[in-house]
Amino acid sequence: MELLRLENIGKRFGGVTALRDGNLIVSGGEVHLLLGENGAGKSTLVKIAAGIVERDSGRMLWKGSEASFRSPAEAAALGVAMVHQESLLAPHLTVAENIYLGREERSRFGWVNRGMILEQARRVIEQHQFPLDPDARVGSLSPAGKQLVEICRAVCHGSSLLIFDEPTSSLSHSETEQVFRIVRALKARGMGIVYITHRMDELRAIGDRVTVLRDGVTVHSGALADIPTDRLITHMVGRDVAAIYEREHLPGGEPLLELRNVSVKASRLSNISLSLRSGEITGMAGLIGAGRTELCRAIFGIDPIDSGEIRIAGRPVSIRSPREAVRHGIAFVTEDRQISGLALRLPIAANMTLANTERISPFGMLNLTEQNRESEALGRKLRLKAASTAQLAGTLSGGNQQKVVIAKWLFRQARIFLFDEPTRGIDIGAKTEVFEIMSELARSGAAILMVSSELPEVVQVADRILVMRQGSISGELPHGATQEQIMRLAVMESAA
């Protein structure tokens, strides 16, 4: 049964066209993949279906009848629910309270019947075999657990169509498999699933049909089995897939950053020794929890080191805070750009110049004209897609937000870059642009550490690969190493 049909959907936000000709057809009992670069219009299209955004043109049919959802509550009442990439749950409430938030059972005196809510939530959780405790606080759950609570909210309210927006972007492999199992079970019950992802390795594991958007237009729709992955990527980016990860690998120069037997007890880092050389991209791989992010935090002065030595350009330094790290020319592009990378409610221009405002503040007064000039130049250099640098950073797509974070450190003229999961949550076209920026930085003499859970990216981009396991470096591999070699070091006690 056809559930949702979106035809020739158009939507503008001010001077920016998000959708020009968006089309999507979803039936019950299928997982329909929605692909496209950041800014292609995917999120806008599904938000229209979920009642979050109103369309400007085109038409929507729900179960064969004309429809126009004016709010998420109206869409949910008719059977459309959405699981967002960023959790919208109340962390101080329990799992059961979140599942029934806004739909609580009340007594005739208006009191919320918490016992009944708890019992209803327990039945739903047991019915779907979700590994959840209905009485647990949501704030204590893992990212995968929070995703399951969002799914529970949808299924317990009788949804026919469930929209997933990047559900596995921050999940481990085992957590991802758990989400897949649940998606397959919902599909078997006849639900329609719209599934947005940038992880190309997920497609064949979960999808039945696929629709591709590019620049606000649907450019392909059909059965997933009928199209190879490289053709999908070509539809997404508008160019041949062969050029996406290619870069020239050059030998590194002098060490810009060295760690000698660095240990951090609080994050269980032990005797870390490494060097980051000028002109080189050093990849860092390892399983989740191996200590890669913790190492970046220690280098950047967020977590103080307990022993060992840090050297910059051959000289010992003491880095006890991010401010001191920045003064020494270190930049940290964090994996959670929306939390610690950007000020989402400030304009692009303010974000780009935030780490070096003194450069454009003669006599302590911020020169807004100079700020705009510098930020516009950085935007052109990084091919930023935005109406202007006055646009709020929080309104940008994931890939463009990442460019703003990088621009901030370019404006600071940093020479040592720590990239922690730089391509998480961005599309394959934006990934290419990020890799091009990193390559250009390396060519200019910067030293780069690239932490990534995407082994194909590490293999293709890095000039040299370090592997971490349980807070220590278990080995080093040259460019050309295989994914199997990396995984062997990631799970072994030490290098063979």
Image (cartoon, rainbow, N blue to C red):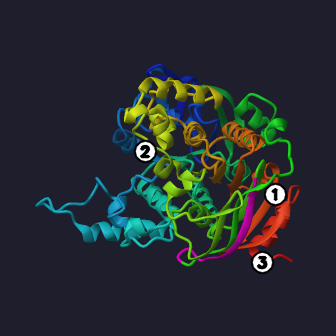
* Callout 2 touching callout 1 (CB < 8 Å): no
Magenta segment: does it hold 35? no
Q: Residues within 10 Å of mark 1 (few under 14, many from 20)?
A: many
Q: Earlier in the sequence, mark 1 or mark 3?
A: 1
- Which residue is label 1 attached to? 464
Left or right? Give the position of 400 relative to 470. left
The residue tagged 3 is 492
The residue nearer to you, when weighing 106 against 84, is 84
- How many discs mark residues in the rendered view? 3
User: Helix, strand or loop at disc 2?
Assistant: loop
Quadrant of res 468: bottom right
Q: Nearer the viewer, residue 451 or 151?
A: 451
Residue type at numbered disc 2 = Gly
Question: Given contact means CB atoms under 8 Å apart, are the residues at marks 1 and 3 in contact?
Answer: no
Residue 347: percent from left, percent from top? 43, 33
Of the 4 image quadrants, the one containing the C terminus is: bottom right
Measured Cα–Cα span from mark 3 to mark 2 = 48 Å
> Which percent across, then down, holds residue 26?
58, 38
Residue 79's tag is 2
For badge 1, the amino acid type reads: Arg
Image quadrant in which you'd find residue 473: bottom right
Identify the residue at horizontal 54%, vertical 31% (top origin). 5
Side of 484 where 187 appears, left or right: left
Near mark 2 (Cα within 10 A), the count class, few <14, some 14-19 or many ≥20, is many
> Magenta segment, principal secondary structure?
strand
271 drawn magenta: yes
Q: Is residue 400 left or right of residue 431?
A: left
Quadrant where the N terminus sits is top right
Element assignment for label 3: loop
- The region drawn magenta spans 266-277
